[in-house]
Amino acid sequence: MNAVSDTRERILDAARRLIYARSYADVGIAEICAEAGVKKGSFYHFFPSKRDLTVAILDATFADLKSDLLDRAFAADVSPLARLRRLIDLTVRSQTEMHAQTGVVPGCQFGNLAAEQSTQDEVLRNKVAEVFGRLAKGLAATLTQAVAEGEVGPIDVAATADAMLAYLEGVVLIAKSRNDPGVLARLLPGMLDIRIMPAAS
């Protein structure tokens, strides 16, 4: 990694840590620069604004989530429903490990930002919606295969995927609000019972 890309990554990493630990509104550019060990001129060389930085953070965070969790969860070495169970297990493990390390359930970075900024910043709202759309698409692909293989009866796949994602995000939020990773272990398996039936014709 050359010095230019290293500087950009340091800014990204510092901002991710600070915003995830606290909130978007609570973290300023000066603090990000201090944490990254760079001057403001370097910040603005890479990111015209904190919003642009946050869009880049969301892209980087999704890429990490995909490689660290989603690709593992949805690997085709097990049945479709087993993949969903593995997604639940990996989510519980991730949040539980972070709680053990930091003393807090950090929640979902995308959900955190959606709750904070969706009524404040249309660009960030659209970006988070795009990420949630990708997550729902992955769930829908798995559900489609589950239906094809007879693991699940006829359902509205897109609606069921959205409902599962909403349930997952809601449980993570409750666990965060109670600072209790046990909430995830108790409730997230219920995601597998969600079925939205096709609309009557």
Image (cartoon, grey):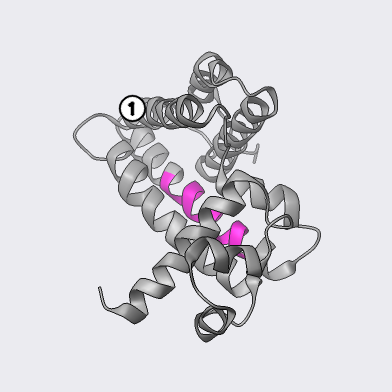
Looking at the rendered image, the quarter that the C terminus falls into is top right
In the figure, 57 relative to 38: above or below?
A: above
Q: Residue at x 57, y 36 (%)?
A: 106
Looking at the rendered image, the quarter that the N terminus falls into is bottom left
Q: How many marks?
A: 1
Q: Position of residue 199 (x, y in %)?
A: 64, 39
In the figure, 14 relative to 141: above or below?
A: below
Q: Position of residue 88 (x, y in %)?
A: 43, 27
Q: Residue at x 63, y 63 (%)?
A: 31
- Residues in magenta, as a range: 127-138
Q: Residue at x 48, y 55 (%)?
A: 134
| 134 sits to left or right of 31 | left
Residue at the outermost right position: 119
Q: Judge by depth and name the residue closer to the eye, 139 or 38.
A: 38
Residue at which label 1 appears: 150
In the figure, 116 relative to 143: above or below?
A: below
* Mark 1 residue type: Gly
Q: Check if residue 134 falls in the magenta segment.
A: yes
Q: From the image, give the main secondary structure of the stretch colored magenta.
A: helix
Q: Check if residue 29 falls in the magenta segment.
A: no
In the figure, 200 relative to 40: above or below?
A: above
| 20 sits to left or right of 90 | right
Q: Position of residue 151 (x, y in %)?
A: 35, 25
Residue at the outermost left position: 77
Q: Position of residue 40 (x, y in %)?
A: 58, 79
